[in-house]
Amino acid sequence: ADPLQNLEVRISYLEIYKEHVRDLFGSASLHHQDKVENLKIMEHPNLGVYVKGLCWIACADFEQVMANLEYGLQMRTIGATRMNQNSSRSHAVFTVEVKRLEGRQPKKSESDERKSLHAKMN
């Protein structure tokens, strides 16, 4: 690995159910529907659309990404239908954000001047 290149991977997972947005990684993921936090979808002039308060998890490798994806799948709202005993009753968005940084990592007192390349996939 090149010491002048750094790769950062973060993931988030949200569910939209009955017009409520909830974080599948956050503490509000408990299946107590009366305690579910309804996150807000916001729009910023420079950043674009985002979900305020959404938890992002840093992952060091593929196994961490998959383990968190499995955890989020278990937290989703499901219910039986006539066609499927474990039907998902919601829509979900799993997001992977990758950032590549090039250059010397700054010391704590320095500002980060490294070149960066960002990619975000839903």
Image (spheres, helix red, strand yellow):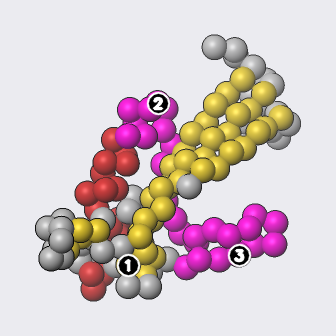
Q: Is residue 28 above or below residue 36?
A: above
Q: Label 1: which residue?
A: 17
x, y percentage for residue 42? 65, 77
Q: Give left or right: position of 53 versus 70.
A: right
Please name the amino acid that badge 2 sits on. Asp
> Is residue 17 found inside the magenta-colored segment of the image?
no
Please name the amino acid that badge 1 sits on. Tyr
Give the number of the disc on residue 43. Answer: 3
Instruction: Assign a secondary structure to mark 1.
Output: strand
Magenta residues span 40-66
Q: Label 2: which residue?
A: 61
Residue shown at the point (37%, 48%) measured from the top left: 69
Instruction: Assign a secondary structure to mark 2.
Output: loop
Instruction: Assign a secondary structure to mark 3.
Output: strand
Residue shown at the point (38%, 62%) measured from the top left: 24
In the image, 70 versus 80, the foreground residue is 80
Quadrant position of residue 2: top right
Q: Give left or right: position of 118 versus 76.
A: right
Q: Residues within 10 Å of mark 1 (few under 14, many from 20)?
A: some
Quadrant position of residue 14: bottom left
- N-terminal label among 1 and 2: 1
